[in-house]
Image (tube, helix red, strand yellow):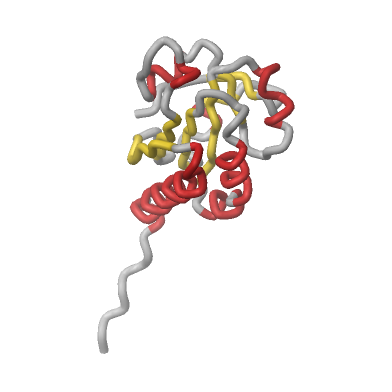
Amino acid sequence: MLPAFSLAAANRERPVSLWDYKPRRNLALVFIPQARGWDELLRAIGSHSAEYAELEAEVLVVVPEAVEVMEEIARRYAFPILSDRDGDLWRRCVGGASDLSSASATALVADRWGEVYGRVLLDRAEAAAGERQIREWLELIEIQCPECFPPEWPAAG
């Protein structure tokens, strides 16, 4: 399960918490070691915002940097970019060493109740493929949603 959190966002006026989405939206928490250098991944996430909306999902990018460091980059994107300055959420969700600046980028994909279904290791050089895997996990979660199943198949006549 995703742990409860409330983090300052570089592109929001107020902190963002798990309870802002639970139980309304499926979530992908994308943990990247720094805001700079991950432009291709951030652009890929931004360019698929309509597809995330159709999947009733939200992507939250989590970076172990101060809000001030990320503000310029965060202004370009509509999805929240969160400051996990002390790395607490990162360590609770992903684990890792004390120095997160060299940690592997990872996405956790969870349903609207916070149950984690998938983990995607992200590579800066293969950002588009990583983003596609995040969407595929969200599609799987949405298909499995008990409220979303199609009606009974019509009986053969």
For residue 79, what is the image quadrant? Answer: top right
Q: Which of these two is toward me, 150 or 14?
A: 14
Asked whether 108 or 113 is in front, the reply is: 108
For the image shown, how many numbered marks are present on the structure? 0
Residue 23: x and y in percent read 46, 37
What residue is at 54 percent from the left and 33 percent from the top? 60
Name the residue at 40% across, 34% down: 108
Q: Please tell me whether residue 45 is drawn above or below residue 100 in the rendered image.
A: below
Q: Residue at x 34, y 29 (%)?
A: 1
Give the farthest residue toward the left. Answer: 156
| Residue extending farthest front | 125
Percent position (x, y) of residue 50?
Answer: 60, 53
Relative to 143, is 152 above or below? Answer: below
Residue at screen point 58% across, 20% down: 83
Point out residue 55 in the picture as x, y percentages from the top left corner: 49, 52
Q: Quadrant of the C terminus?
A: bottom left
Give coordinates of residue 139: x percent, y percent.
42, 53
Q: Is residue 109 above or below residue 34?
A: below
Q: Quadrant of residue 78?
A: top right
